[in-house]
Image (cartoon, coloured by chain):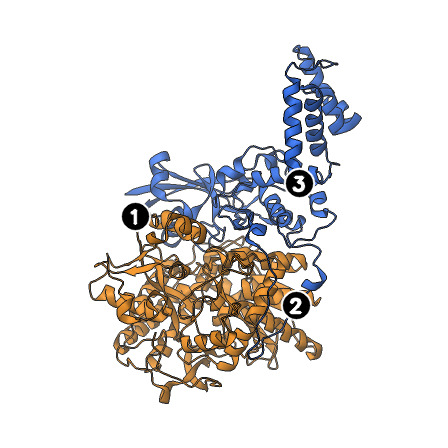
Amino acid sequence: MEFKIRAYRFNPDTDEKPYYKEYTVEDYPGMTVLNALIKVKSELDGTLSFRRSCRSAICGSCAMKINGISKLACKTQVSPEIEKFGIINVEPLANMPVIRDLIVEQESFFDKIKEIKPYLLGQREDEGHDNFHALKEGEKISQPVYYKYEFQNLTGNNDTPNCILCECCYSECGGVVGNPRYLGPAALAKLYRYCEDPRDNDKNGSRLVNGSKPDGMWDCVHCQSCEEFCPKGISPVKSIVKLHERTIKNSITFSAGSKHVVSIAKSIGETGRLDEIKVAFDSGGISGLINDLPMAFGAGLKGKIPPLRLKLIKDMDDIRLAYKELDLEEK
Amino acid sequence: MLKHDVIIVGAGLAGLRAAVELRRKGIDAVIVSKVYPTRSHSGAAQGGVNAAFDENDSWESHFFDTVKGSDYLGDQDAIEILTSEAPANILDLQKMGVVFNRNDKGGIAQRPFGGQSFPRSCYYADAVGHMMLHGLFDNVLKYKTKILYEYFVTSLVTDNGKVSGVVAYDIKNGKFEGIAAKAVLFATGGYGQVYSSNTNALINTGDGMAVSIKAGVPLMDMEFVQFHPTTLKSTGILVTEGARGEGAYLLNSLGVRFMSKYAPKAMELAPRDVVARAEQTEINEGRGVDGAILLDVRHLGKERIMERLPQIMQLSIDFEGVNPIYEPIPIRPGAHYSMGGIKTDYNGRTVIEGYYSAGESACVSVHGANRLGGNSLLDTVVFGRRAGIDIAEYLKTAGERKFDESTVKRDEEAFEKLKKSSGKERHGLLKSELQEEMRADVGVFREENAMKKALEKIIELKERAKNIGIDDKSKTFNTDIVEAFEFNNILLIAEVIARGAILRKESRGAHYRTDFPERDDENWLKHTLATLDGKENIKFDFSEVAVTKFKPQPRTY
């Protein structure tokens, strides 16, 4: 069966603006979008440009938008796409500038990976690299002991170390759309991976402090896209939520985001209600309040004025009990 | 022109391991790679990395297994280093942040692998290559290493017999760059794309080997190509040997575990050459299932499959439409690994002073005629590290040298000439013809006449390659021209393989001649060394195999 590929084309050497070009390809059972692109390139049009390498969903090179969704071309079968859309539409990933055709500039993505210090911090003395030696005849080596449970969050099928840095999550991330400086899901998942590592010796929590700075973990908008579109079944947003928990537990609460969460928890714990004015003040201080004024004014015009004094809700005892139980659980 | 102390070409495990070694010492080493480091094919390694840790195991046993696995063609002095340094290397990776699955005693969990007399393959589910690649990459970032990615190296540059740098094509910007250095390490991987039906990434086109032989560095034992016994029938995608390590069966169309006939003791865990031949024999004799063999893991149970072989499960579902929990996986042998490569010693040194190689691109030789599963990842870190150490030493007395900048112009002109070409041949199609010919006639079973036919085809393709047309005339990210160069590289490598295979009139390890079915230690216990005579012709020399502890014995499993 023949089908059509409609490819986003842009060559900065010759094109003023992007355009789309259609190719007709013969299908075969099991054909992937990458197979189809390779067929186009080798038989019809050598100028169509895309990245590719392993063709088995482990290297992350061939991520692109296929019928609007960021996917690995090597892992995407042609026939279900055709059934659903009648065509294969291929476009470059979003949230990164296009270099050419389906190829994007990844520098900003990888810079963010570098920014989170993706390695074990604070090596212990006895774990230096100098005690390396080849074994002599009859000699055995002794190894450090780490039990399964110590790595339990790093050895599951969908745990963050399985991330292949393909940028699908980054391309779909609502947070990056709003703030291009935001670290994004892959970098934060990696940050979490190293926080969870039992060998990590980041005593003063510098990694969490770094991750809490503006454009960091508190800029996640919780849209869940990263989880939805990860080709490896990983959920960066879950890692980000766990990072939030960790930072607050470690009293790293200088960021507006963490202050916001702490203030909400406090407000509910005291009155059972959300004291919006206080939460805004706690998170952003006076300047935050002033920034929020236009929004508050607009809300006021529509009759949505938060009360200045909150009354306790009538089920307050239940809330106190719930807080108490949660506290106990923590301990 | 750029200038650094060391250039590391290739950013897979061997290259990154060497980079870490050099950067830890504060040496100015730059990584040059045609893809971003995490795209390297090391990441596709699945099953394990070998090291003797258990109190009932010993590195000496690993040593012997590897020598026997190599069909006695491996150099025993090098294999001794590989196996005795293995445990320390694995622990070093662990210190760097690599995660391995754990056993109940708190040590690194280990699974059985083919040809190993003890379960000694350390693993991270079935994605240990990915884990190691990303772990090492993270360390390369830690030491703030400069990375020139999407740079395609076209030449090695020398000055009076000493290496002086490389010429590289900046793919993104479409310009040539000379990079001067006192030492160059090629960790450029293998050439799986010489064959159709291979497990390799599309980038594995033997570039480093091709550049080396053109620079006068011999390629050793190139006729030894590993065919992995379990690759998905439709795509050739790898299914780890770890599946058999976990207890999978190989079944023919009669539902029989046919390995009992070929390796009654080791069964499915015989070395890869033995299993691949057994499968091909079953298929050839009509006991295949649509040209495939079945890999059955159902009896392991859902839980174990999900825990130990999750990637295999997903790959089977996504690429073969088969869920291994409920159905056996159709598999067949596919080209997988190059035992041969750039001739080096066990410190990674080649015949050119300051020029090194490590990993799959190198031939030390620790794998001889057949590599054992789980030994290639080990090879990358042991010899990547050793090359790093040796380079650091070498730099102390290396002295200055001149980088001949005319080499940049020369390569640029060759590129421009090819780019302008509007011939009728399409390199993508020529590549398919070459791959299919190599699979058919220089594959698992080999025979003189068939191989001569393959050689004729290669010569024909070389002629037709002169008439390749390039569609893409632009500067920015011109992958058309890069692929054309890659094709020329695999064409050269294919010729070296075919000629070496015709030359070697015996059967040893992965090189099986139906017309010479026996191993012939008297005449052929030696390495073949291919060089270019003048420009075009490949000529062969031989070198001794280092036999230290284990005299060659008949090899049965």
Label 3 marks a residue whose chain is A
Q: Is residue B468 left or right of residue B441?
A: right
Q: Is residue B266 left or right of residue B203?
A: left
- Which residue in the protein does label 1 denote? A28
As helix, strand or loop, the secondary structure at mark 3 comes to helix
- Which residue in the protein does label 2 denote? B22
Q: Residue at x 56, y 50 (%)?
A: A149
Residue that extends furthest to the right in the rendered view of this protein? A286
Colour of chain B, in one word, is orange
Q: Amino acid at mark 1?
A: Tyr
Q: Are marks 1 and 2 on the same chain?
A: no
Q: Amino acid at mark 3?
A: Arg
Q: Residue at x 36, y 34 (%)?
A: A84
Which chain, by letter, is blue? A
Query: How many residues crowd around disc 1 within 10 Å: few (fewer than 14), some, or many (20 or more)?
Result: few
Q: CA distance from mark 1 to mark 3?
A: 50 Å
Label 2 marks a residue whose chain is B
Q: Amino acid at mark 2?
A: Leu
As helix, strand or loop, the secondary structure at mark 1 comes to loop
Nearest to N terminus: mark 1 or mark 3:
1
Q: Position of residue A169 (x, y in %)?
A: 54, 41
In this view, the mark in front (1 or 3): 3
Report which quarter residue A120 is drawn in. Answer: bottom right
The circle on residue A246 is 3
